[in-house]
Image: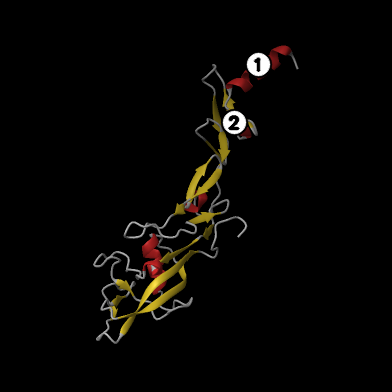
Amino acid sequence: MSKHFQSAYDAYLSECPSTKEGGVCNGLGSCTSCKQDQAYCTCGPGSYLEDDGTCYPICPGDNGICNGRGDCYYGKCQCKTFTPPPAKRGNPWSLQEPFSYKGPACETKCGSFTFDANRDHEYLGLPGTDHSPHGYALDDGGVGDHRDDPDGELSCFCQKKTGVYDEDMKATYSHAFKAFNRFQPTYSCIAPEMRICRPPTIFDWCWHLDVVRCQFGDKASCSEDK
């Protein structure tokens, strides 16, 4: 290799955008070098130009980049995260982990969160109502203290409460208590205008939900090892 060629090649390398790992244009494009500070990369098929001026592989996804669930950043998907809103009175819920997507193409839904009003001896209100401190009392859908949700009432609560309207946002656990001497009726989440229970006397009661655990997809945790 002649000294003239080596000198020209070194100048080419110094002027062209590059990365430590991939070299000029990150190994995914060609550099047009006319004058110093004017060199630029032309990216090849399957790659795109990033803010640093070099090329990176287009992020994967069967339904668009990152499956529409994240942004492509330097060749890797940054998946969206959903954090439940604060409690109505301004007190934060006991956050265990936000809902999110994971995987190279954000293909996996994950995360869980427990809405718990029991610590205040209160009930969970119907999302979107403000007729009492916590809203209309949410009916337990006939499920009580277990994991079934035959009518989808609790999953409806999870979707409305988190704002994630996805069939894989479901309730995996709930707890309800007998609200003696309380004339607060309970309402349906699916049909908010439908009153489910109204105690006729102080000796009767309605089941009020105070705990609902919501889960996004099959993974309760978005941690890599869970």
What residue do we see at 36% from left, 70% from top?
A: 121
Residue 14, image x, y percentages: 61, 21
What residue do we see at 54% from left, 54% from top?
A: 102
Rounded to the nearest angstrom, the CA distance separating label 2 from label 1 is: 17 Å
- Secondary element at image label 2: helix
What residue do we see at 74% from left, 14% from top?
A: 2
Give the answer, above or below, for where 214 lies relative to 183. above
Give the answer, above or below, for where 35 lies relative to 31. above
> Looking at the picture, which amino acid does disc 1 mark?
Ala
What residue do we see at 32% from left, 83% from top?
A: 205
Q: Residue furthest top?
A: 4
Left or right: residue 204 compared with residue 18:
left
Residue 215, image x, y percentages: 48, 65
> Looking at the picture, which amino acid does disc 2 mark?
Cys
* Residue receiving disc 1: 8
Asked which quadrant contains residue 10, the reply is top right
Residue 72, image x, y percentages: 51, 44
Left or right: residue 146 compared with residue 126:
right
Residue 208 is tagged as none
Camera-nearest residue between 103 and 26: 103
* Residue receiving disc 2: 25
C-beta proximity under 8 Å, tags 2 and 1 = no
Q: On the rendered image, what quadrant is the N terminus found in?
A: top right
Total of numbered circles in the picture?
A: 2
Camera-nearest residue between 26 and 136: 136
Residue 168 appears in the rendering: no
